[in-house]
Amino acid sequence: MPFIHIKSLPFKQAFESASTLININREFSEKNNIPEFHIHSSWEFYLPGHYAKGDQAPSEQPDNFHPVIVDLLTPDFNDNQTIAGMLSSLADSIHRHAPVAIDRIFINHRQAHSGMIFDDGKVVSW
């Protein structure tokens, strides 16, 4: 943990998701002092027309309207300042490694609570 899940419409230009995710993981690790092997990430694409904002449902990721939606899940032991740093560094990395303006990134942070995670064959507490 943390888990980073990114969703967007397909991009107009070619996009290499594997290398993008690896770069995002590496930078998230470095900027937040979390071992890289603990960071999981995914990038999913909505089918064209399966993401609407208001009255618009485009087939490709627009440059100026629909945000890329990011879900960040981290353990609940991080304070607000640490979480703010994670949010900012993640937005910066996504912006630099993907064709997304920083003001077109929406990140929702969720907390995983001790005793409410199943991992490595057992319920995990910290």
Image: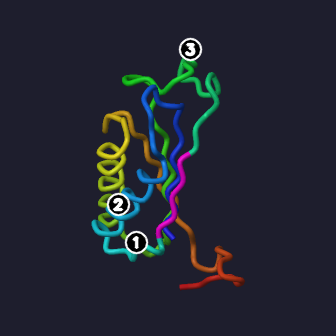
Give x and y (percent) for residue 38: 48, 74
Q: Residue furthest right?
A: 121
Magenta residues, start to end: 39-43
Q: Nearer the viewer, residue 89 or 81?
A: 89
Q: Nearer the viewer, residue 81 or 27?
A: 27
Q: Which residue has dot 1 on it? A: 78
Q: Is residue 49 left or right of residue 5?
A: right
Q: Is residue 44 above or below residue 111?
A: above
- The part of the image, by quadrant, that contains residue 90 is bottom left
Q: Is residue 93 left or right of residue 74?
A: left
Which secondary structure is most common in the magenta stretch? strand
Residue 106 belongs to magenta span: no
Q: Which residue has dot 3 on it? A: 55
Q: Amino acid at mark 3?
A: Asp
Q: Is residue 113 left or right of residue 26?
A: right
Which dot, 1 or 2, sits closer to the camera? 2
Kindly report the distance in space between the C-alpha atoms of the residues bearing marks 3 and 1: 38 Å
Q: Amino acid at mark 1?
A: Asn
Q: Is residue 53 above or below residue 124?
A: above
Q: Nearer the viewer, residue 126 or 72?
A: 72
